[in-house]
Amino acid sequence: MNKQVCAIIGSQWGDEGKGKLVDILSQQYDIVARYAGGSNAGHTVVVNGEKFAFHLLPSGILHPEIICLIGNGVVLHLPTLFKELKTLEAKGIDFTGRLLISDRAHLLFDFHQIVDGLREEQLAGEKIGTTKKGIGPCYSTKALRINLRVGDLRFQKHFRENLKNNVEYMQKRYTFDYDLEAEMKRYEEYAGLLEPMITDTVDYLNQAYASGKNILIEGANATMLDLDFGTYPFVTSSSATIGGACTGLGLSPNKIDCSIGIVKAYTTRVGSGPFPTELTDELGNQIREKGHEYGTTTGRPRRCGWLDTVVLKYSHMINDFTSLNVTKLDVLDELEELKIAVSYSFQGKKLTAFPSNLEVLANVEVEYETMPGWKMDISKVKTFDELPEAARNYIKRIEELVGCPVKWIGVGPGREEMIER
Ligand code: GDP
Ligand code: IMO
Ligand code: MG
């Protein structure tokens, strides 16, 4: 790779397989850093048949020599973090001294999760289909400037007053009970447990960079779920794209010299919102079952559809990917033919850019190219040249349409099931 700072970013609506590439590339890096989102993310790593699902922890944590860092842009639900750490401990993975948590990261409380659920209930038929992990409410209180940050755990009196104000603010708008005293007790305990991990990660990362350390940046959620660039309002509440890597870590854009776009070989989406290439027929079900397309965080069935290069070109424009990792190519093994979306039209006119308006997006006509399938098992293939011609052509067509080289191809969930070119 020879790139000092590299960001791994989801190019579609999430669950492209970011965790797997982060795990693989971690071996070449000193630090793996998460910059956005919270426990709405679910990143899967499969090592020797054993499956790990990370929600808050960076996916590099399985490598004993790597420092894992949770940046200021992340919203942190401490009960979830400690649960994840317990699972790791039970599996004999030692993380002592190698998990650093930003003192500027915002704390996500149980009441944020309660409000997330209540808000979804209110929206009824218009609901976003959130993970109910409290993401929107937490980022809202961050923007309102009434939330608490990790560093505030060090000042109990101030913590108590601000938590009380924060809860009261929400209780004026939503009806729910909250045992503030019990919550305070829990956080007093967390404060002690977290203390050794609390770090000024902005200073740490920049010093590490200056001393020549390699940094792998792990994206969560994805470009089409980005608060600004995604299919608003059916998005998450953070900046999942490359800009978020800078603001979520305190790293200058000049320091990021590589960004890898993770592209699922087809498209999936969890939750509501327009999805132009969605397959609502039997084929969609077939892809869901073959690809085990059920949410890592919520277990919800993922909506499935054809690969959409209109989405990918937009995503590439925003993130300026250095290269792509096409994942889950093996899931398409049995298909007779494949379709790739190449353009959208609205009211008879071809669109020249990805539409910002959902009324437009929900009503576009999609133009497809059809390509033959390869109808064989590719899960054991180790090199690009060994892939059947039709699979190679599919990859080459993605490169042409998106205008970006495909450097990795996933042919199975395991660490070793990755072709590198
Ligand atoms: P992330 O959120 O982007 O890290 O992705 P998820 O972990 O939520 O979802 C990706 C799923 O696909 C996980 O279950 C992975 O184990 C699995 N996966 C990743 N790459 C491949 C691949 O190349 N082939 C197959 N069959 N599964 C894959
Ligand atoms: P990873 O990192 C897939 C989706 C939710 C919902 C919308 C808003 O695993 O790729 P939120 O709870 O964030 O307020 O929900 O965003 N969503 C994801 N979908 N993968 C994710 O993360 C997601 N994170 C959020 O399903 O539609
Ligand atoms: Mg996921």
Image: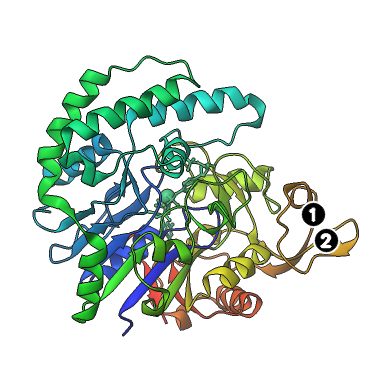
Marks 2,1: beta carbons within 8 A? yes
In depth, the one of 240 and 187 nearer the eye is 187
**Residue for badge 1:** 364
- Which residue is depicted at the point 42% across and 74% down? 253
Residue 98: give x, y in percent of width and height: 14, 59
Instruction: Name the amino acid, label 2.
Output: Ser
Dot 2 or dot 1, earlier in sequence: 2
Instruction: Name the amino acid, label 1.
Output: Val
Ligand 2 closer than 8 Å to label 1 CB:
no
Q: Is residue 257 left or right of residue 92?
A: right
Q: Is residue 5 left or right of residue 11?
A: left
Residue 280 visible somewhere in the drawing:
yes
Quadrant of image for the N terminus: bottom left
Residue 302: give x, y in percent of width and height: 54, 43
Residue 377 visible somewhere in the drawing:
no
Structural crowding at the residue carrying mark 2, measured as other residues with C-alpha within 10 Å and reported as few (<14), some (14–19) or many (≥20): some
- Which residue is depicted at the point 55% across and 63% down? 265
- Which residue is depicted at the point 22% across and 34% down? 158
Q: How many marks?
A: 2
Quadrant of image for the C terminus: bottom left
Q: CA distance from mark 2 to mark 1?
A: 5 Å
- Which residue is depicted at the point 12% across and 46% down? 195
**Residue for badge 2:** 345
Residue 161: name its quadrant.
top left
In depth, the one of 418 and 116 nearer the eye is 116
Residue 319: give x, y in percent of width and height: 52, 70
Q: Is residue 370 left or right of residue 334?
A: right
Ligand 1: quadrant of the figure: bottom left
**Regarding mark 2 in the picture, which secondary structure is present there?**
strand
